[in-house]
Image (cartoon, rainbow, N blue to C red):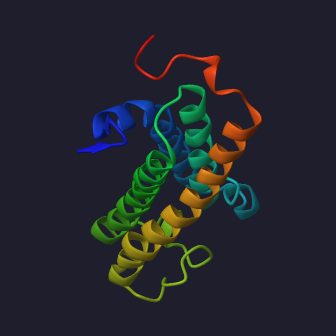
C-alpha cells in the first residue's frame, strides 16, 4: 500500500519515535497510579492529551523531512491514534483477565466503570476513540503542515530518503 508515494513501512519508520513516546506516557501513567501518586499528577500523563500532540510532532517531522502531503498526515494521525487506543485497550483487557484494577478502569477515569465486562469500554476506545482522535489529529496536523509550508521556503532540504 502506498500513500502519496510512500509505503506503510516508510510511515512507520518515520513515526517510530512517536510510537515510543506514546508507549512511554502509557507506562508512566500505569506506574504513577500503581505507586499511589495523587490523581492530579496522574492526570498529566494522559494519552488523550498526548495523542493530538504527537500528531503535531508528526506533521512537523513530515515538513522537516519533506515527507508526503496532507494525506500522509491523515494516515499518521490514524496510526498514532490507533496505537494509543490499542495501548489503552491492552490495559483494560489486562484488568479484565487478571482482576487487578489499573488506572484505565478506575471510576475517576472511566465513564463505563460500572460495566464489569468492560466490553463497551473497549469497543468505545476502538471505535469512537480511534475515529474521533484521528479526525481531530488530522485536522490539527494538516493545519500545522499548511502553516509550516506557507511560512517556510520549500527548497530548504532534500526529500525524505534521499540523504
Could you say where residue 22 lies in the image, as x and y percent from the top left?
51, 45
The residue sitting at 33% across, 66% down in the picture is 93
In the rendered image of this protein, does residue 155 appear above or below residue 130?
above
Q: Is residue 22 left or right of residue 89?
A: right
- Residue 109 in sight here: yes
Q: Residue furthest bottom?
A: 114
For residue 40, what is the image quadrant?
Answer: bottom right
Is residue 35 visible in the rendered structure shown here? no
Q: Residue at x 52, y 53 (%)?
A: 30
The x, y position of residue 147, in whole percent, is 72, 45
* Total numbered circles: 0
Q: Which residue sits at x=45%, y=36%?
A: 15
Residue 66 is situated, as x and y percent measured from the top left of the image, at: 53, 29
Q: Nearer the viewer, residue 10 or 33?
A: 10
Left of 129 or right of it: where is 107?
right
Quadrant in the picture for the C terminus: top left
60 vs 110, left or right, is right
Q: Quadrant of the N terminus?
A: top left
Picture quadrant of residue 161: top left
Amino acid at each position: 500500500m502506498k500513500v502519496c508515494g510512500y509505503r506503510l513501512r516508510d510511515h512507520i519508520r518515520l513515526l517510530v519515535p512517536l510510537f515510543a513516546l506514546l508507549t512511554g506516557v502509557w507506562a508512566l501513567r500505569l506506574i504513577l497510579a500503581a505507586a499511589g501518586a495523587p490523581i492530579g499528577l496522574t492526570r498529566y500523563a494522559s494519552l488523550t492529551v498526548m495523542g493530538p500532540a504527537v500528531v503535531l510532532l508528526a506533521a512537523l517531522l513530515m515538513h522537516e523531512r519533506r515527507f508526503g502531503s496532507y494525506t500522509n498526515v491523515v494516515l499518521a494521525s490514524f496510526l498514532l491514534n490507533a496505537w494509543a487506543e490499542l495501548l489503552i485497550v491492552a490495559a483494560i483487557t489486562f484488568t479484565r483477565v487478571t482482576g487487578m484494577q489499573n488506572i484505565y478502569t478506575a471510576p475517576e477515569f472511566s465513564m463505563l466503570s460500572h460495566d464489569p465486562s468492560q466490553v463497551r469500554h473497549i469497543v468505545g476506545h476502538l471505535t469512537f476513540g480511534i475515529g474521533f482522535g484521528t479526525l481531530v489529529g488530522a485536522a490539527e496536523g494538516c493545519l500545522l503542515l499548511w502553516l509550516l509550508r506557507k511560512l517556510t521556503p520549500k527548497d530548504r532540504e532534500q526529500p525524505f530518503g534521499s540523504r
